[in-house]
Amino acid sequence: MKKIFLAAAVLMSFGVTSVSAQMPSMSKHSARGVQCTVCHQGKEFKPVPTSQCVTCHNQDALASKTDRLNFISKMKNPKTGEVKEHKALINPHHSYHFGKTEDCSDCHREHRASVNDCGTCHDVKAWGMKDPK
Amino acid sequence: MTQVKSSRRNFLKASASLVAVAAPFSAYAAEKPKYDEEVDVIVVGSGVSGTIAAIAAAEKGSKVLLIDKMSRLGGTSRISGLNFACVGSPLQKEKGVQDTPEKLASDMYKVSGNMGDYEKALEMAKNTARAEKFMTERGVKWDGRLLKLGGHSEPRVLVSIGDGAGLLNALWTHMKTLKNLETGLHTKADEIILDKDGKVEGLEVRQDYYFDTPETDDLQNKTGTKKLIRAKQGVIFATGGYSRDKVFRSIEVPFLAGVATTTNPGATSGALKTMVRAGAQPMHLSLFRFAYPLPTEDMIWGVIVDPATGKRFMSEGATRNALAQTVLLRRMQNGDKKPFIIYDEKSLAKFHNLNRVQRSLNGLNGIDGTMTKFNSVEEAAKAFGADPAIVKNTVDAYNQAIKEGKDPEFNKPLERSGRKVEPLDFSAGVYAMPVNPRLNYTPGGIRTDLKARALSMETGKPIEGLFVVGEASGGLHGQERMTGCSMPECAVFGLIAGETVADRPKQ
């Protein structure tokens, strides 16, 4: 316990002055050779807005890539036997609720594990949707 | 002299008691704040109440800034159905429905457990036709249905095309034509700035705010750049409820700890606390309203099982709130295992609305709203973590009792709306899903008057320049909010607040 505390204290004391200690431990883009300043433009390290992401990632292309997630929901009426169909628009890049207005960072996190924003309300497991990168 | 309560920490230090909350104005005089920006009206929150308030104020000539802390506009409204109880709509006239504002206000009061506000409900009801006209003239389209929903004495509920998203998209398209209305996403309202007389002067906000998770956001999120914005005519809080705030809601009502919700992830208690710090009175915070993926009146056809014991523990014919409380209390006692309900195909045929069953069977009915078809009761039991043999016995015993025309264990009524509860016949499969009520509305919020002005906790009088609309306000509905009555509250008081603030002198 003591050792852990000591280690943390040493790290913290470095953190005050050393830039490298402030570097995020995970950087998915830089792991693929993209430098920090490609996304973080300007003097400070601010969160990157979607308008910046789309200068490299084409939004429409992304949306059509995940169009395959949309599916036809079906149910047979137990009384009449009639089958009713309904198109489920669950493409996260072009969804029923939000169209194409979602921020990239609502799901995709650069410096930690990404989250599935649909999953805050929906049973995404039932859709067979993979976790966002 | 003006003072800014710029630091939450200072405030908390200084105000451990309610007295300090109620009289914060003269407590710490500071120098006149330097404002970074100046507008006439700031609207916080961009659901249906905030959007309508912003449009109404802008159309009366005010320079309006509409902000939202989230990455997108619309809050919970955007993912809601927004069923709209409206008295005197063109559709009611066309169909010759004899309705009055008094009838709607009485309907609302009847279910409120004597805790609703009849006078305010009446004010709301009187303005619903005006709000309908306002929205229709600005592009909102209704789908032509006129529904008589539960608790309503007349058919009066309108449904917009495309749900909440459709309604809001129409209003936002109109909003873009208003040059004196600007929107700012990723902008969080931290503090209300009051002058020495306790009148609202402006807001302390953070721009470039990036919302994180509901559990930690209000306390731990340090993102964004601080800005002071002067609001010459006033500030409207349309900040929604706090269904997502697990800590806050379970202090008020312990069994709400584990409840699910499908509201806007940003529905935390931060905005409520900001308003309380400015001296506004919160009320009815211990009240709650549940929603279910499938109608509660259709639970009566099935068997609800506690996975911990494999046995029944309640009548499936219980009312909406009783059902939720029994299920949630059971979860507090059984190691947080979610009870589940078992149906046969014949019971599905008894549902009023098969669309919702279809959504459940296809995974489109939200968290814990998915229904799965199994080959046997044992298989279903296993999937929900229960002992298959015990559950099989439970269901067999249930079927035997129902066959004999009784339910000695829980005495559930064996008939509803002319349809009989029958023994379950699994020859066409076993259908099962979790029973997990969702806390999708918090009736509590800031006390307001008929002009949507926030009332001071200390004096009971309006805090000048502070308006609270929609779910963020409290006291209208009481213990049970009638279905279709959140939308008219949002629309009407959003409209009234927008008009009233725009009539205030610019200070």
Image (cartoon, coloured by chain):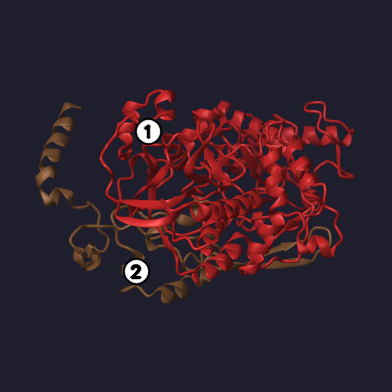
Chain colours: A brown, B red
Amino acid beneath label 2: Ser
Q: Is residue A46 left or right of residue A87?
A: left
* Distance from the alpha carbon under mark 1 to that under mark 2: 41 Å
The residue tagged with tag 1: helix, strand or loop? loop
Other-residue count near label 2 (Cα within 10 Å), few / some / many at <14 / 14–19 / ≥20: few
Is residue A13 visible in the rendered image? The answer is yes
Question: Of the numbered discs in the image, which one, if any, rests on residue A51?
Answer: 2
Image marks 1 and 2: residues in contact by CB distance under 8 Å: no
The chain to which mark 1 is attached is B
> What residue is shown at x 38% (from left), y 54% (from top)?
B187
Amino acid found under the numbered disc labelled 1: Phe
In terms of image quadrants, where is residue A40?
Answer: bottom left
Residue A128 at x, y = what percent?
Answer: 52, 60
Q: Nearer the viewer, mark 1 or mark 2?
A: 1
Q: Position of residue B31 (x, y in %)?
A: 25, 40
Subunit ID for the residue under disc 2:
A
Circle 1 residues within 10 Å: few <14, some 14–19, many ≥20:
many
Q: Which structural element holds mark 2? A: helix
Please tell me which residue lies in front, A47 or B144. Answer: B144
| Left or right for A47, reference B86 | left
Q: Which residue is mark 1?
A: B25
* Residue A107 can be seen, yes or no: no
Where in the figure is residue B140, as x and y percent of width and height?
A: 64, 67
Quadrant position of the N terminus of chain B in the picture: top left
In the image, B298 versus A104, the foreground residue is A104
Q: Position of residue B167 (x, y in %)?
A: 61, 63
Q: Residue at x 81, y 46 (%)?
A: B425
Apparent side of residue B298 relative to residue B373 in the rendered image (left or right): right
